[in-house]
């Protein structure tokens, strides 16, 4: 079954210039990239993305982390990988959440670290299941930014909306 997963190259991955390495590793999956962009996590987006962890002691630090405040890189690279078994394939390559427990050959095992302040800097986010993938993809991407139809959409008219065009 074709599946989609959200991948984020987190700010530590960008700071360490790992984008190329991570994309090369992910290409082993033979999945298709159907959306990609550099994006900034606002406070609201960060909190919404990680809302399942809001009661954890490291939550505040995690929000600083994904916003890029720990790495002087206020951005992430967001991608959608699509194809057979996308979630399991990408999560296996990513490795365990805790970079010290991750296989040394996995992305997190190779490039992640644990800081003394406690948040796991594990360079990459991968959606955990279909439900999370749908929720996260809809948080980070608009339908027209994705080259396949993943989820139902609707057309709305917003007369008061202002959009920026090239000057
Ligand atoms: P996942 O990223 O492997 O799906 P989640 O439990 O969803 O793991 O956690 C989201 C992120 O929060 C992790 O990728 C990691 O950066 C951080 N994190 C999770 N658990 C811990 C912890 O016990 N200590 C510090 N940071 C953690
Ligand atoms: Mg998760």
Image: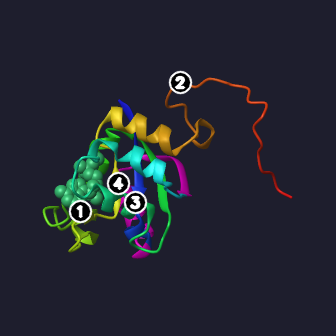
Q: Are marks 4 and 3 in contact (CB under 8 Å)?
A: yes
Separation of residues labelled 4 and 1 (CA atoms): 13 Å
* Left or right side of 109 for 136: right
Which of the two discs, 3 and 1, labels the residue nearer the N terminus?
3
Q: Are marks 1 and 2 in contact (CB under 8 Å)?
A: no
Which of the two discs, 1 and 2, labels the residue nearer the N terminus?
1
- Residue 97 visible, this angle: no
Choose top left, top right, bottom left or bottom right for residue 85: top left
Separation of residues labelled 4 and 2 (CA atoms): 24 Å
Which of the two discs, 4 and 3, labels the residue nearer the N terminus?
3
**Numbered disc 2: secondary structure:** loop
Which of the two discs, 4 and 1, labels the residue nearer the N terminus?
1
Counting other residues with Cα less than 10 Å from the Cα at mark 1, is it few (<14), some (14-19), or many (20 or more)? Answer: some
For residue 106, which numbered disc appears in the image? Answer: 1
For residue 152, which numbered disc appears in the image? Answer: 2
Image quadrant holding the N terminus, namely top left
The foreground one among 149 and 135 is 135
Residue under pointer 4: 125
| Image height of 44 relative to 70, above or below | above
User: Which label sits in the foreground, 2 or 3?
Assistant: 3
User: Which label sits in the foreground, 3 or 1?
Assistant: 3
Query: Residue drawn at (21%, 56%), measured in percent from left and top?
Result: 57
């Amino acid at each position: 079954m074709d599946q989609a997963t959200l991948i984020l190259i987190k700010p530590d991955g960008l700071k360490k210039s790992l984008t190329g390495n991570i994309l090369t590793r992910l290409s082993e999956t033979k999945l298709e990239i159907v959306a990609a962009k550099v994006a900034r996590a606002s406070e609201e987006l960060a909190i919404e993305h990680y809302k399942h962890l809001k009661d954890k002691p490291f939550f505040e630090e995690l929000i600083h982390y994904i916003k890029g405040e720990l790495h002087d890189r206020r951005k992430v690279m967001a991608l959608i990988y699509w194809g057979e078994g996308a979630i399991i394939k990408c999560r296996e390559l990513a490795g365990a959440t805790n970079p010290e427990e991750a296989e040394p050959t996995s992305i997190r095992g190779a490039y992640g670290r644990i800081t003394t302040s406690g948040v796991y800097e594990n360079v990459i986010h991968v959606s955990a299941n279909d439900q999370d993938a749908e929720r996260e993809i809809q948080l980070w991407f608009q339908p027209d930014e994705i080259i396949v139809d993943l989820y139902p959409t609707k057309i709305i008219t917003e007369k008061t909306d202002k959009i920026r065009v090239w000057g």
